[in-house]
Amino acid sequence: MSAPVHADLVVHGGTVVNAGGSVPATVVVAGGRVVAVQDPSLPLPPHERAIDATGSLVLPGGVDPHCHVGQRLGDYAQLDDYGSASIAALWGGTTTVIDFAIPDPGQRPIDAVHERRKLAEISRCDTALHGCVIEWDDSTAAQIAEMANTGVRTIKLFTTYKDVVMAGPDTVLEVLRTLHAQGGIAYVHAEANHVIEDAQALAVAAGEAAAGHMPRTRPELAEASAVSQVLATAEHVDAPVYFVHQTTAEAVDLVRDARRRGVRAYTETCPHYLYLDERTYSSEHPERFVCCPPLRAPETVAKLRARALVGDIDTLGSDHCCYSTHQKTEHSHDVRVMPNGLPGVETRLPVTFTQLVVRGGMPVERFVGMFATNPARLNGLTGKGVVAAGHDADLVVLDPALRRGARSGDLHMATDYTPYEGEELAGWPSVVVSGGRVVLDADGFHDPGPVGRALEADPMPDHLIT
Ligand SMILES: [Zn+2]
C-alpha cells in the first residue's frame, strides 16, 4: 500500500476512455500529472478540487498533429499567434498543438525551427514542431541531426508548390533515409505537382480558376499518384512515412496495403474532408472552403469516412489555418493566388466526434486513438495521448449527449468564420485540464498564461501503431 497522495485534482464519476479500452474510474492528478486512475468504489484521496464527471467521458487531451500558427506564406499572414491559437485549441479540447517550421525563402530549416520555438513561448498549451526541408544540400544532414538533438524528429515534405516549398524526389529520398537514422519520420503532403499545374492551367484557360471551381484545379488522382511514388521511396530506403491530409480512399488504401506488407506508413485526414464536400464551392462563400487538397465529391467523402470507420486512418489533424473572409475573398478569382486553408484547431473534436462516433458509430476508443493517442505516438511525445498514471494530466470531460450549434461568434480562433456555421455538433468539452490546470469548466475559460512547454520528441520505436 503506497502512502496516500494529496491530489491537486480528482475527476470522478466518469468513464475514462483510452484507445485501449474504457473503464469507469477516478482520475487523480498531482503535480501536473495523472498519479492514479483508480476504481470508482475507492474513497477519493485528499484533494484541492474535485470535478464531478458523472455521465461524461474522460478523454486524454487532444494532440493536433497538423496546425499552422501565424505563418506567413507568400502575401498572406495567418491572423493568429501562439497565444490565440493555443487558447482556441484548449477551448476545443486540444492540449498539444504541433506546428510547422516552414523556412522562409533562403532561410535554413534549422533556423526556422529556432524561430518558431521562440514564437511558441506565449503558448497556453504544450507545443511541438515539425521541421521542413525544401531542397537537399551539403548541410541538410547535419541540420536534421541538429533538429533531432533539439527534439524535432518530424519533417514536412511537399511534393507540390513548385518553386515555393516543393521538394524533389531526390530530396524526399535523402530526407526519409537521414531522418529514419535519427528516429524520426517524414510528414508528406502528397499531390503530383505536374497534374496540379496542368489542371490549374486548363482551368485558367477555361476561365474557371475562381474559388467556386476549386475541385477541378486539384484532381483527386493527383493524390494517389504522389502517395504511390513516395511509398516506393520509403520502401526502398526502409523508412517510415506519414501522409498528411489524405482525402481519397485510393490514397488511404495505398498506405494500408503498404503497411500490410511491412512498410511503416501512416495516414492522417482532417475534419473537413470527413464532414464537408465540394457542394460548399457552390455556396455564397466558396472562398471560405478553399483548402489544399480541396473538399471532395460526396461519394469520395463517403468512402473516406468508411475507411476511417474501419480503422484505416491513423490520425485526425486539423490543418488549422486562420485567414479571414476578407483575406480569402481578395483574390478569390484565382485559386493559385488566394490563401488556402480552413480554421479548425478549435472544432477538430466536435466535428469528428459527431461525424465518426455519433453518426458513424465508431467506438469511442478508436476515436481517441485518432484524436490523441496515435498523434502522440507518431510524434514521439511520450507522456501524451493516454489517461494513465505517469502521463501528463491533459484531460477532456465531455457529455456525449450534449449538442450545440457551431457559431463563429462563440469560437475563439482569430478569424470571422467557421466552415461549420450552424451545424449541430456533439463532443464539445465541458471541462478541459491541461498540465493539471483546469482551463475550461462551467464558469468558462481560465487563461493559465504562457505556461505551454516546447515538447521534445523522443526517438520513435520501430512499431508505432499496430
Ligand atoms: Zn497543412
Image (cartoon, helix red, strand yellow):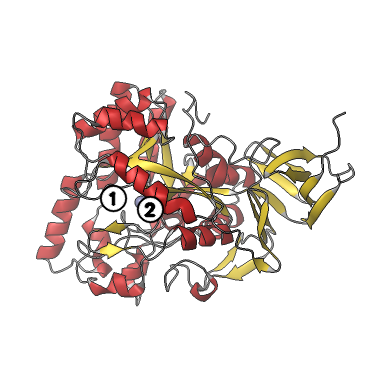
**In what quadrant of the picture does the N terminus appear?**
top right
- Residue under pointer 1: 220
Helix, strand or loop at mark 1: loop
* Residue at the farthest left position: 205
Q: Quadrant of residue 274?
A: bottom left
Q: Quadrant of residue 36?
A: top right
Above or below, comparing residue 213 to residue 99 in the picture:
below
Q: Earlier in the sequence, mark 1 or mark 2?
A: 1
Q: Kindly identify the amino acid type of the residue bearing the numbered disc 1.
A: Glu
Query: x, y (%) of residue 92?
Result: 56, 59
- Residue under pointer 2: 300
Circles 1 and 2: CB distance less than 8 Å?
A: yes
Mark 2 and ligand 1: say if the CB distance to the nearest ligand atom is below 8 Å.
no
Residue drawn where x is 31% and y is 70% of the image: 287
Badge number at residue 185? none
Above or below, comparing residue 42 to residue 350 in the picture:
above
Does 359 sit left or right of 178 as displayed? Answer: right
Residue drawn where x is 36% and y is 44% of the image: 114
Q: Kindly identify the amino acid type of the residue bearing the numbered disc 2.
A: Thr
